[in-house]
Every structure is written in C-alpha cells, then in structure tokens.
Amino acid sequence: MTDAPLTAGPSAKYKRVLLKISGEALMGPQGYGLHPPTVERIAQEVKSVHDLGVEICMVIGGGNIFRGLAGSAQGMERTTADYMGMLATVMNALAMQSSLETIGVYTRVISAIRMDEVAEPYIRRRAVRHLEKGRVCIFAAGTGNPYFTTDTAATLRANEMACEAIFKGTKVDGVYDKDPVKHADAVRYETVSYDDCLAKHLKVMDASAIALARDNNLPIIVFSLDEPGGFRGILAGQGTYTIVRD
C-alpha cells in the first residue's frame, strides 16, 4: 500500500466528499449482521473513487447489528440503547477498514467515543491531515451523544471536514415522491430543495441532518449503492441520482 497525498484528477467533480451508508447496506441478502462479499463490493466502490484522487470520509450506520431507537421502543432505556447502537457502528467501521486495507487503501477508524485499542479518538485537525495524506477516514460512534442519528453525525462531520458534498448510498437511484418499491408511478426528483425534503417528509435524512446541511449549504447526493460503478460515475458527472440543495 502507498500512503501519500493524492491529487484529484480532472474527471473528479469534487475533491473531498463524505459517503453515508446504512448498516443494513452491509448485510447483503442476510437479515442481520455483516455479509463479507457485500462489504468487499462496497470497499471496491470506495477504492474506485479514491483512485481518482478524491479525499473520502465515511459514516456507516449500525442498524444491521443494533438500532438504538428500536431498542428503546422495546422498553430499553433510550440513552443505553443509543450507546449500544454507537458500538454497532464501530464494528461496521472496523469491517470496512479491513476490506479497504486488504485492497490497498489506507484507512483510519475515528471514534467519537474513546476506545484507543481499536480506533483513534476524534480530533478534527488530525482527521483533516489523514485526508490530506490520502487516507480514508471512517467516522464511528455517531456524534458520541445519544438522541442523535448517524445521519446527523454524517452531516456534522462533513461540515467539520469541509466536504463539498454528502453522498447518501441507498437501495434506490435517488429521491422519489413516494416509495418506488411499492408504487410503480413514483416519480424521481432530479433536484429537490432542503425545505421540500422537510415539508414533504421525503426521508432523505432525518430533519436535524437536513437542517444542518441546509444551514451550511452542503449538497446531499442520493444514489443507488447497488449500481456497480455508480459512486465513481457521479464523480465523473454521469449516472442517475438526486441532488438535494437550495
């Protein structure tokens, strides 16, 4: 592996981005946990963009292992449930780190909760330096606080890292006016405003994340993580996606 600063090539639309994916994206056809071939496939997608010289941050949810809100709904104390969910995101981050480094991409897992034996603590300036050196930074454990989702953590970290866009990888190729899986007449938006996302409850991200992106004029690009080469294609100005902006 090489560990040297990279320069974004002429085909890269953005120099620094944050990729947000759900924990469920890592479980593949299984109903729970991690599916190694799926983790490896996503790692290859990240590498293809990294090879363009794009600086990449990642935030991965923990819903494939434990979701704090679900635990709370079943009677668990909410703060405890949320901390358990944060630990699940660390497990996913370590799995992604392993897959990325296996294919030659230097990676740092950076946790909002201190666990020095397995991850670095979050220090903004250090994280920025990792990006400048061409390392992928995977931010784990959310914001380190209960009652905040990984959507909010992703938007917070993207702003702190001065990312130019958030890429939200989902199972569909953009934002629709209704669920395209259930409704054949669902219409995909090419662009949609932050305020419309909130007013129409389009479920791109939670309300706190959308408001934080809006207040800092940070575009959110929603695309299909299941489309091979989709992440790289958007960086080259191609592909199908929806962009959320003013």
Image (tube, grey):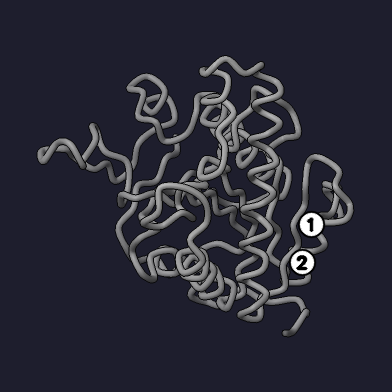
Hey, which residue is sitting farthest right in the picture? 116
Q: Nearer the viewer, residue 133 or 143?
A: 143
Question: Which element type, helix, strand or loop, lies under badge 2?
Answer: helix
**Residue 143 at what x, y percent from top left?**
72, 35
Q: Look at the picture and state if 67 lies above or below 87.
A: above
Q: Whole-percent x and y of residue 81?
A: 65, 26
Position above or below: 4 against 21: below
Disc 2 residue type (three-letter): Glu
The residue located at (57%, 37%) in the rendering is 66
Label 2 neighbour load within 10 Å: few <14, some 14-19, many 20+: some
Q: Residue at x 39, y 31 (%)?
A: 203
Instruction: Spot the residue most to the left.
Output: 185
- Is the residue under label 2 in contact with that under label 1 (CB below 8 Å)? yes
The local secondary structure at tag 1 comes to helix
Q: Amino acid at mark 1?
A: Val
In the image, what residue occupies the spot 35% across and 47% down? 242
Residue 132's tag is: 2
Judged left or right of residue 59, residue 38 is: left
